[in-house]
Amino acid sequence: MRKEEIKKAVREGYAKIVKQDSSCCAPVNSCCESIDLAQSVSKSIGYTEEELKAVPEGANLGLGCGNPVALASLIEGETVLDLGSGAGFDCFLAADKVGENGKVIGVDMTPEMIEKARENARKGNYENVEFRLGEIENLPVADNSVDVVISNCVINLTPNKRRVFTEAFRVLKPGGRLMISDIVLLKQLPDFIKNSIEAYIGCLSGAIMRDEYIDTIKAAGFQEVRIIDETSFPIECIANAPTAKAIINNLKIPPDAVREVANPVISIKVYGIKPN
């Protein structure tokens, strides 16, 4: 698949998601047995009830695979950058932690997401949050200007992960921190998944091997790079996600094969620091 083809498909896929207010893990019958799937998914990956209630309605689309804000140890007055900020969920949580003297910048390449996030910011009266339309491979952010870079299940969507981490390194101040939640693999996926646009949008075929992911972060210049936590990605969510469901149905993949595909898919939380 060509890089531009992937970007176009991902942009269109996430535009549909925000218009429907539904997550990429949004089955007809919730994998978490809850009417409000986005809330259920978010609780299962580390968000508290208080955090879910603290953000404007419509900010949480259930698209994450971890809670990078909780692990980033944000300090009042810091400037935070969220790569692939979506409807603003993590930005709003970060804004509460950095306070009125701090600032949060969200960058997303989907105009519909940016529009939704700005609307949510207005609803929640967030004056310390700004959303910018742009690609995470070419960040519309100045050099050495942010204290913390966070991202939640987004970098797996880009074909040029090295460029993303190089850009994150560029915009961080010396001593700045990186805290990422993302999807990686323990073994390679079958070709029919890797070559599927639907699986790319569904956070599957763009994922790379765990060690390669860590090496890519280190190659960008980050030090003290380590995995804070890793967990398996729920097979129920993968098997029921609309994007994955389309692949399963079209290719008539049996349930055992679906489980075999999902087993090597894990969620990791990664920390790194830009040296002084």
Image (cartoon, rainbow, N blue to C red):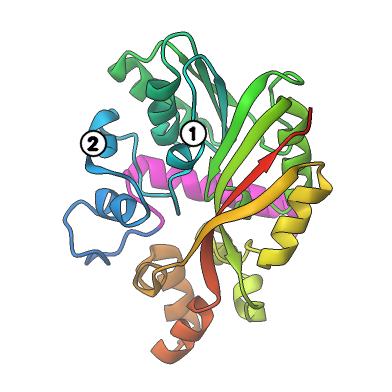
- Residue 73 is labelled as 1
The image position of residue 232, as x and y in percent, is 46, 69
Residue 160 in view of the camera:
no
| Local secondary structure at mark 2 | helix
Q: Is residue 177 left or right of residue 142?
A: left
Q: Give 245 or 45, whichever is nearer the viewer.
A: 45
Q: Does the magenta stretch include residue 99?
A: no
Which quadrant would residue 96 be assigned to in this image?
top left
Q: How many marks?
A: 2
Dot 1: few (<14), some (14–19), or many (≥20) neighbours within 10 Å?
few
Q: Is residue 114 above or below residue 229?
A: above
Which quadrant would residue 50 be assigned to in this image?
top left
The image position of residue 151, as x and y in percent, is 55, 41
Q: Give 232 or 12, whichever is nearer the viewer.
A: 232
Q: Callout 1, which amino acid? A: Ser
Looking at the rendered image, the quarter that the C terminus falls into is top right
The image position of residue 223, as x and y in percent, is 76, 43
- Residue 151 is labelled as none
Q: Does the magenta stretch include residue 17?
A: yes
Which range is magenta? Answer: 1-24
State the separation of the CA atoms marked 1 and 2: 17 Å
Residue, disc 2: 50
- In terms of secondary structure, what is the magenta stretch mainly? helix
